[in-house]
Image (tube, rainbow, N blue to C red):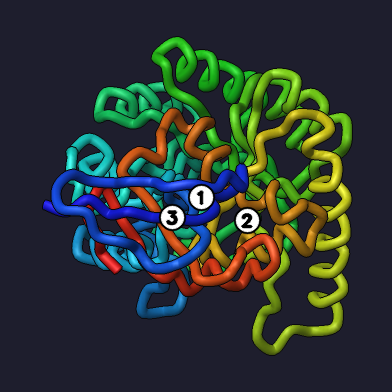
Amino acid sequence: MTTWVFEGTVLPAGDGGRVSVGSGDAQPLPGRFAVPGLVDSHCHLTLGAGADGWPALFGADFARERLEELASAGVSAVRDVGGNRAVTLKLATTEDDSRPVVIAAGRFLAPEGRYFAAAHEPVAPEELLAAVEGELADGATWLKLVADFPEVGPDGPIRGSVMAQTYETELIRAMVELAHSRGARVAAHCNTDIVSELIRVGVDSIEHGTALTEQDLQTLGARGGAWTPTLCASVGEAPNETPERRAARLARSEQLAAMLALSDRYGVRVLAGSDVVGSVAGEVDLLVKHGLTVTQALVAASTGAQEYLGLTGDGNLVTYDADPREHPEILATPASVVLNGKRIA
């Protein structure tokens, strides 16, 4: 066994000193700056592109490869917000110090025709509460509600651009109350102005949230809620982008920047999430470009997320040669990674 020793500046607080991780003979770690593990708060370990190019669910091998990639990038914990429940709930309920901690929401909760056909098992409105009971019984500590989505055809493609609410508001309220009564929380995919109703009925974290308003932030922050903007997915440039799509993307970027600039004022816990197209390092960079200070973005990707998700950074350390506060891009190239007391990179 080895005790890994870091001497330098520990972020996001910026404290200087000596940090020891592990037990045994002391060995120094390279780098002059460190964080106590990164957190990917919006991850899909089993979601990828199917043979037809549309999202589909994959198995345990796919998830293990994804976790290895995340660990090498310094991610010590992930919140999986929807996927192959047989895989993700097992990962969440099985202790394994060789990989990042997994917190899982199990399946995507959406009715037929309101999420990608190969990526979920439809849940009819009358079956929603029973489905929630099933997720909780199998170890889910979060639930993933797809609260709005365009119409999706049975063979995969999205048929239109109009987002529609998936379940009636009062049913969502009942779902949230059931989850809270069992000690679980609800994360809601939402890109329309129904976000105000979701917050009103008690949803815990808003995922994407491209239609959030200042009043929404005030209400969400007042009860300790969180927002994962997934900027990599929301504002990332798509290949062969039309002028119309580019204009819409830039409008989303401007709206998200305006709301992120207000998030700290209202006490909203901003979280960093890669979704399926980005990385924690890339998300931190975009959070800074959209109104957060570098320190706030680092908090969103490390200690703030750990606190919100009920985790600690104990046993984890990621070091860097340069200061991420001056060079956020350095997060993509750690000098070393210690996960659960073991150096893996």
Could you say which quadrant of the image residue 46 lies in? bottom left
**Hey, what amino acid is under mark 1?**
His
Q: Which residue is mark 3?
A: 7
Residue at the spot x=39%, y=68% of the render?
30
Point out the residue furthest to the top here.
181
**Hey, what amino acid is under mark 3?**
Glu
Residue at the spot x=28%, y=29% of the render?
139
Q: Is any atom of residue 121 visible in this view? A: no
- Return the x and y of residue 124 as percentages of the image width and height: 46, 35
**Left or right for 298, reference 163:** left
Q: Which residue is mark 1?
A: 42
- Return the x and y of residue 158 as percentages of the image width and height: 59, 66
**Hey, what amino acid is under mark 2?**
Thr
User: SS class of the residue under badge 1?
Assistant: strand
Q: Callout 3: few (<14), some (14-19), or many (20+) C-alpha neighbours within 10 Å? A: some
Q: Which residue is mark 2?
A: 230
- Return the x and y of residue 188 as percentages of the image width and height: 59, 38
Observer-nearest residue: 291 or 130? 291
Residue at the spot x=65%, y=86% of the render?
239
**Left or right for 154, reference 196:** left
Could you say which quadrant of the image residue 331 lies in? bottom right
Estimate the spatial distance between the alpha carbons at disc 3 and disc 1, rounded to whole Å: 31 Å
Observer-nearest residue: 299 or 212? 299
Estimate the spatial distance between the alpha carbons at disc 1 and disc 2, rounded to whole Å: 7 Å
